[in-house]
Amino acid sequence: MNKFYIFSSPSLRAILQFSIITSLLFVSLVGHVKSVEALIESSADKVENKNKKQRVFSLPKPMLDELMKNMVLVEAGSFAMGSDSPLARNREKPVRQVSLDAFYIGKYELTQDLFEQIMGWNNSFFACDKCPVNNISWFNMLLFIERLNSATGKEFSLPTEAQWAYAAKGGNKSQNYRYSGSNNINDVAWFADNAKNKSHPVGLKKPNELGLYDMTGNLWEFCLDDMSRQAYTFTESHNPFMGDKENLKQKAMKVIRGGGYEFSATENLVFMRDGATNNVRMADIGFRLVMSKN
């Protein structure tokens, strides 16, 4: 005899109860998963932050001693910035009086050994420890300086254009030479006629009046300022600076000074200025450090 099983239809109350229980279980499960995810993310963030805090940049004492020994004091003073030479372009005009507080500036362009010690890499062309570092962007320079300051407890910076120009002309010891330290470019610079299309180790030519080397030729040197053809008209006369120091990491054209190994004698005149974007890397652009006297 066949048996038939008859199932009664569930009541609305039962359906609602089942639905409520299922919803509660789902909410509980989702909440648990989110709690686990939050815990994992929180732990990962803590590990990442901990690793960042533990990253320490260091400079061996002999290298620090050499670096500090090579920072040259530039006494406070005033000078004529710009040029009224027939060879001067609009970007180098007008001539104006500028005054500056005292500061220290590197005797040499920053060398590859020091850069690599702090950064852990060196992509320079013409590699050698005492050759000037190159093929790095202005942003790379800024990061290097941040790490160098962390390693040394000092406050190094890129020079403002006014600081660079004052130092290149010899500060308050200036003899008003055409190039930095001489009227004969061969005495003080690696340039198109003698460099053989490459940069050279720092300090092989004669220094300028302040004892600074390669302020003319070898590599162009980045400054802190934004490049503007009207900068000499717009900026203030005491400690002038063109740009926004509160927002240095925005893309901009930056001033380069000093000429370079591929450029002619005329293009290496001490007043010449040019510009390059802060993300560009070139074989003929480097930098030197400054530090406040205070």
Image (cartoon, grey):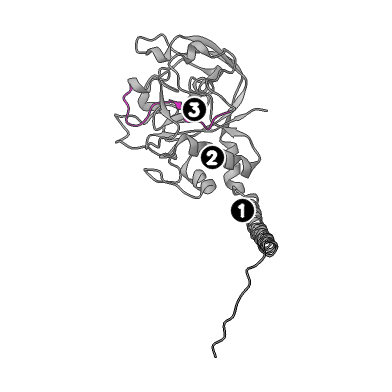
Quarter of the rendering occupied by the C terminus:
top right
Residue where numbered disc 1 is placed: 48
Left or right: 152 as drawn, with respect to 187: right
Please state which amino acid type lies under the numbered disc 2. Leu
Left or right: 282 as drawn, with respect to 62: left
Tell me the residue at 63%/72% (across/down): 8
Of residues 34 and 203, the one nearer the viewer is 34
Q: Earlier in the sequence, mark 3 or mark 2?
A: 2
**Secondary structure beneath label 1:** helix
Question: In this view of the protein, can residue 110 be seen by the observer?
Answer: no
Residue where numbered disc 3 is placed: 223
On the image, the x and y values in percent for residue 22 come to 66, 63
**Secondary structure beneath label 3:** strand
Q: Are marks 3 and 2 in contact (CB under 8 Å)?
A: no
Q: Main secondary structure of the magenta part?
A: loop
Residues packed near mark 3 inside 10 Å, few (<14), some (14 to 19) or many (20 plus)? many
Tell me the residue at 45%/18% (across/down): 228
**What range is drawn magenta here?**
247-265
Residues packed near mark 1 inside 10 Å, few (<14), some (14 to 19) or many (20 plus)? few
Please state which amino acid type lies under the numbered disc 3. Cys
Above or below, 97 relative to 224 = above
**Secondary structure beneath label 2:** helix
**Residue 163: which quarter of the image?**
top right
Left or right: 88 as drawn, with respect to 22: left
Quarter of the rendering occupied by the N terminus:
bottom right
On the image, the x and y values in percent for residue 112 come to 46, 43
Can you tell which of label 1 and label 3 is closer to the viewer? 1
Of residues 58 and 47, the one nearer the viewer is 47
